Amino acid sequence: MRRHKIMIVEDEKLLGKSIQRFLSHYHDCTLFTDAESAQASLETDEVDMVVSDIRLPGKSGMELLQWIREKKMEMPVIMITAHSSIRNAVEAIRHGASDYITKPLDLTELEFAIRKALETQELREEIHYHRQKQQTMPNDNYLTGSSMSSQEIESVMQRLIQVEEQTGETPSLLITGPTGTGKSALARRLHQQSPRAEGPFIELNCTAVTESMFESELFGHEKGAFTGAAGKRIGLFELAHGGTLFLDEVGHAPLSIQAKLLLAIENKKIRRVGGNQEITVNVRLIAATNLDLQTAFQEGHFREDLYHRLALIHLRIPALSERLEDIRPLAQFFLQKAKTKYKCEGAFLSDRNLEELEQYSWPGNIRELSNEIERSVLLYNGRELRFDYLFQLTEGLPTAKAKAQGGTSISDSRSDAAASAKSSSINPSPELVNETPFLQLPPEGLDLATLETRILEQAVLQTNHNVAEAAKLLHVSRETLRYYLEKYAIDQDHLTGWPQSIPREGIPFDQVEKIVIEQALQRTKGNVTGAARLLNSNRDILRYRIEKYRLSE
């Protein structure tokens, strides 16, 4: 627990020294005997709290308190008063004092009051931080498009707002959809348009919290609840009281916390880690994920009861490629934002620009469209916006719209852009690709994330669960194979394997992923986006793998 800076203002020197000596065990204290010198110090030095007697020579403690509040200083102030002046103490509370202590002083009681006031101040500062963050977030009303799916989403949103206005009820909401479709923006917009708009909007990305700290992050903890818990902490459920708690990537929440999360949602009560008191919370809970939670609970990775509780209302945001009619209004929206940001009033989207944007498949969805519009405005040359970067990504690849219209690709109509794209694509070498027919990439592609698991399973199946023989097939030691079997949680009673048998000479396990990535790059002529689609992988993840295996050299 950090040491706070405490200013003590007490004209009785013996009492002041006693207070300073006692509190110095916990805090850094400075002592003043009059309000004028304390006021002069506050003009230049920062303190976390003021403890002042009401009766002082010259200016009174009450006048010092009023001056502090007039200067918009937010630190807590505790007033010391005699029994006979309780009325003055109550008046001090009305003027913004945090608490008051009566003489004769109980120093332990004073330290407890200081600790409570500091904790309350920290809570206020944290809520203020989240509210400021919420206010600086863009009001992304762009989610309302002209497509049927967008209009359906908007209809459900307005119904949820209406229900809360009429009944005060806030049914839990689950938002699903691919990465980049605007799930967090939709959650924020629901909050901003609802009766809870003045309350906090607290967001937690579940992938950013370690499993050991998840419970403390959500529910808070008491001092000493675990090693390192030096002080009490308020959890996100309490911080979101009266507002909205948004759990992004909820599909990654650890199983160990899901039962407690379910109870908190159902009972609207939480209990801090290490605490005994139940705390009532009033929050709208919104969760989002790009995972298929139904598959996750069928596979035992997510609680089915929690899924049904979260998905009381379920909104699925389709990929941008599934709602092409939204591209034009979204592009115009992002254009206006970028023009304002970069003071580029002359930039405009021509009909040809809009057709080009509609031809692209947008694997990064709305986020990618926003970034592309912003990039084009930033590089605006005074004539028209250009989207050459898109053509570098899609060289030789048919898009959804092009296929529907019997066309081929954007690069067919932009040979100059395609030529520039060739210089920036990855050129895989064919050696490993051609000498391993066992690992030929199917025409429809495969799932890179499960590739190594399936090869391990095939080795185990092919050798009738003989670890030594399976290790030989994969060119690894038995210890290494056991490590991989544990790492990938291979269930030897339920093995899927690979469509073909591993050849007698085996295959180096550490080359499996590299071989398949090289084939995908070769088939797409070095286009990373196309290769990522073939491998059902994220483009950034694939770029990392390309660098890992040095395939770009």
Image (cartoon, rainbow, N blue to C red):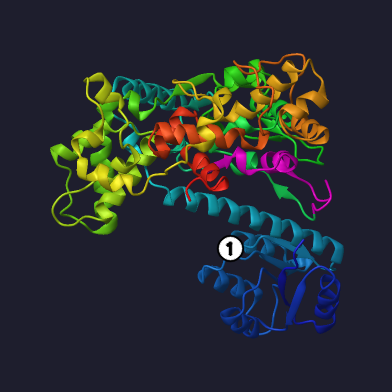
Toward the viewer: 195 or 63?
195
Residue 483 in view: yes
Question: Looking at the picture, does residue 507 appear above or below residue 112?
Answer: above
Is residue 204 inside the magenta stretch?
Answer: yes
Is residue 463 inside the magenta stretch?
Answer: no
How many residues crowd around disc 1 within 10 Å: few (fewer than 14), some, or many (20 or more)? few
Question: Looking at the picture, does residue 484 appear above or below residue 75?
Answer: above
In the picture, measured across the screen, residue 469 lies left or right of residue 263, that is right
In the picture, measured across the screen, residue 333 lies left or right of residue 454, that is left
Residue located at (77% from left, 61% from top): 1
Toward the viewer: 346 or 157?
346
Residue 168 in view: no
Residue 133 position, x and y percent, is 48, 51
Residue located at (45% from left, 23% from top): 315
State the image quarter where residue 327 is shown: top left
Toward the viewer: 317 or 428?
428
State the image quarter where residue 102 is shown: bottom right
Question: Looking at the picture, does residue 254 appear above or below residue 490?
Answer: below
State the image quarter where residue 329 is shown: top left
* Residue occupied by mark 1: 95
Residue 192 position, x and y percent, is 42, 39
Mark 1 element type: loop
Residue 380 position, x and y percent, is 21, 55
Question: Looking at the picture, does residue 119 appear above or below residue 495?
Answer: below
Q: Give the range drawn in magenta.
A: 200-229
Residue located at (31% from left, 23% from top): 151
Amino acid at pointer 1? His
In the picture, measured across the screen, residue 503 lies left or right of residue 12, that is left
Residue located at (43% from left, 35% from top): 522
